[in-house]
Amino acid sequence: MLLAACQLGLTLILIGANVVVGKLLAVALPVTVILFLRCAIALVLMAPICLVVERGRIWPGRAAVGNILAQALLGTVIYNVALLEGLRRTGALEAGLVLAALPAVVACGAAVILREHLSPRRWGAVAVAALGMAALTFGRAEGFAGSLSGDALVFVAVCAEAGWVMLTKRNAVRIGVLTSAVWMQACGATLLAPWALPSLGSATALADPMLGSLMAFHTLTAGVACALLWYAGMRRAPANLAGVLAVLLPATTAVLAVMVLGERFTAPLGVGLLLMLASMVLATERRPPSR
């Protein structure tokens, strides 16, 4: 239990840190180039591990290919492109708060698309998240670092990630988590290649030690470590643990945005952060322990 909590917690901290790293990278490089390199390098690193762990059985099966392709389109391409393009226009603090709406958006999608019954507690999470988004919108006069268009793009990323979550719920085909992760990277690189390859010359900017280090961190954490740690933790964690620990994502982003990027933490941002954290906790169903 403790190991699973550490694995999930570290994953969410790394995701929160990558919001700040992604903002720095997006200023220097085309978004498609960042993502193509991340997917390609992660694929090279993860494929040999997958071959060993899965004993060479890495073909997911014809029935799973379409589902994995759709997951890669939503969870790898649209999510990351919208997030990084949004980070060009908005502050990392605001982006971290918008990302915190994910559990509420997943709940709405489950109710509308999957026809799942939501408890009053989870509908409350949706309402509180909406109030948090309103705090960001109406508090913009307080000197926020971003823009409404940037926040909207980050919200598009949240919706794409929610779609990815629902696709994983609907996938009846059981394949190894490493196999799924490797094929997600492969599909992502393939989908991004037509837009990234013409601009690949801009990757020479990575010769700068600082920028190269940020890209290496982004690839090794967001592309490799997060997937491995998350899947390992979810194998042992109780159902509600990930939702409770999810508060680490916006909290990490907020701290690093202030310390690294020098963004100003205003009162409306504080209200928005508290509302988003409350929404994430409410969105986590409390189930009685099995007897």
Image: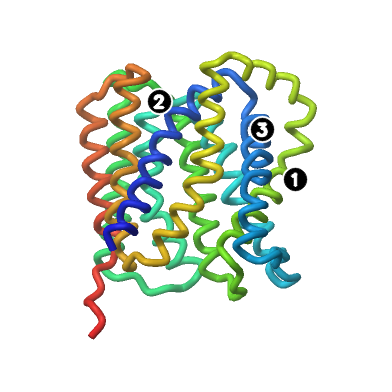
Q: Which residue is mark 2?
A: 91
Picture coordinates of residue 193, whole percent (x, y): 76, 38
* Nearest to N terminus: mark 1 or mark 2: 2
Q: Nearer the viewer, mark 3 or mark 2?
A: 3
Of 34 and 113, the residue lying toward us: 34
Q: Which mark is residue 32?
A: 3
Picture coordinates of residue 38, whole percent (x, y): 62, 37
Q: Which mark is residue 190?
A: 1
Name the residue rendered at 62%, 74% in the picture.
173
Neighbour tally class for label 2: few under 14, some 14-19, many 20 plus, Cα within 10 Å: many
In which image quadrant can residue 25 be found?
top right
Q: Is residue 281 above or below residue 91?
A: below
Determine the secondary structure under disc 1.
helix
Of 205 and 171, the residue lying toward us: 205
Picture coordinates of residue 73, whole percent (x, y): 65, 50
* Nearest to N terminus: mark 3 or mark 2: 3
Whether the residues at callouts 3 and 1 have beta carbons within 8 Å, the answer is no
Task: Say which quadrant the C terminus sits in.
Answer: bottom left
Residue most extreme to the bottom: 291
Name the residue rendered at 56%, 62% in the picture.
177
> How far apart are labels 3 and 1 at the CA level?
12 Å
In which image quadrant can residue 19 be found?
top left
Picture coordinates of residue 52, whole percent (x, y): 64, 60
